[in-house]
Amino acid sequence: MENQEKINFKAGFVNIIGNPNVGKSTLMNSFMGTKLSIITPKVQTTRHRILGILNGENYQIVFSDTPGILNPKYEMQKRMLNYVFSAIEDADLLLYLTDIEDIKKVNEEVINRVNKLTIPVLLVINKIDIHKQAEIEVAAEFWKKLLPKAEIHKISALRGDNVFELMDRIIELLPNHPPYYDDTESISDKTERFFVSEIIREKIFLNYRQEIPYSVDVQIEEFKEKEDITVIRAMIYVNHRTQKSILIGKNGEAIKKVGIQARKEIEMFLGKKVFLELRVKVKENWRNDPNTLRRFGYTD
Ligand SMILES: Nc1nc2c(ncn2[C@@H]2O[C@H](COP(=O)(O)OP(=O)(O)OP(=O)(O)O)[C@@H](O)[C@H]2O)c(=O)[nH]1
Ligand SMILES: [Mg+2]
């Protein structure tokens, strides 16, 4: 009986790739039933590969949320694209997410790599809630030609349309395999500190325009759990000295707003009261500096 159960267990790496802003993080959060990855209306929100480990009775799915496919202009973006390539290589099942609008922005190298795969590929057309049926069909035809082996699904990650059906199909296609992670408590490979820094970065993405969101990185310098409160001190690094004053704003109003929004969400995330201190530091051209990037967690 026990052996039979082991044989019936399914586990695998389900990696989500696609252009920026198509809804990859929204979809992973929807599968996980909780907010792991940050989401904003801006492109290039996700910068790391983030695992979401979902344990079912007879399965364990290890989702990977990845940065959007881009043409790298600086070292950080090169590393972001490398996370996409690694996710293509080590998947047991690949979810290629598109949002109809991005038909014109196809990265040929990614398509070539995906077409060489022997694992199942699901081409998932997202955001069907805001597109007409005819547009969705045009997109489906387009992708059929480009990724002939892929199975096409049409969903709305935001509204939940067809997400359960997609999940069922994923489980069906997963290989028989024992779980990769024994600890059924942890739902990600990333630490609490990481998610806290991401929440702060999300608020920066939402509060500033133009190049500011793309010029910052957030590092947690202190994370002290006291009996009734968690004390968190975070450093926001900017890429250029002119950005520091923009981030702080007149009389510190702008950064204060970020702090209030972030603290509220961190309190929900940790289930505890939080004292949050944000500081800003200039680190000229950090996005191109291999040592700083490594220290900030962008592995090469
Ligand atoms: N209307 C609609 N909007 C959606 C849907 N899924 C995601 N969005 C929105 O699309 C925007 C981008 O979503 P994300 O999940 O951050 O997209 P992403 O692919 O992870 O983006 P990057 O991390 O920048 O590559 C957000 O404003 C989402 O609310 C959907 O099914 N319908
Ligand atoms: Mg994302």
Image (tube, helix red, strand yellow):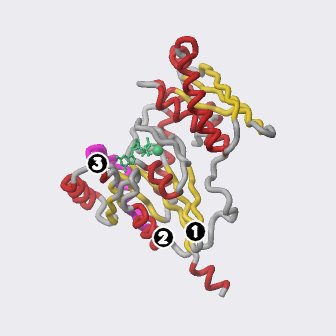
Quadrant housing residue 252: top right
* Side of 225 relative to 43 (left or right): right
Judging by the rendered image, the residue that carries numbered circle 3 is 130
For the residue labelled by badge 3, is the local secondary structure a helix, a strand or a loop?
helix
Which quarter of the figure has residue 2? bottom right
Query: Badge 1 is on which residue?
Result: 56
Q: Does the magenta stretch include residue 246?
A: no
Distance (Cα) linking label 1 and label 2: 10 Å
User: Spatial distance from mark 3 to mark 1, Cα to Cα?
Assistant: 32 Å
Q: Which amino acid does label 1 sit on?
A: Gly
Q: Name the residue under label 2.
A: 171
Please tell me in which quarter of the rendered image ligand 1 is found. Answer: top left
**Looking at the rendering, in which quadrant would you find the C terminus?**
top right
Residue 113 place in picture, x, y as percent: 39, 56
Give me the C-alpha separation between circle 3 and circle 2: 28 Å
Identify the element where label 2 is drawn.
helix
Tell me the residue at 65%/88% (across/down): 1
The answer to whether residue 19 shows anywhere in this view is: no
- Judge whether 95 appears above or below 169 on screen: above
3 or 1: tag closer to the N-terminus = 1
Seen at 59% across and 19% down, the residue is: 282
Any atom of ligand 1 within 8 Å of the CB at mark 3?
Answer: yes
Residue 54: image quadrant is bottom right
Query: With respect to residue 268, does 34 lie above or below?
Result: below
Q: Residue furthest right?
A: 227
**SS assignment at label 1:** loop
The earlier-in-sequence mark between 1 and 2 is 1
CB under 8 Å between discs 1 and 2: yes
Q: Which of 67 and 146 is in front in this view?
A: 67
State which region is magenta. Answer: 101-122
- Residue 64 visible in the shown view: yes
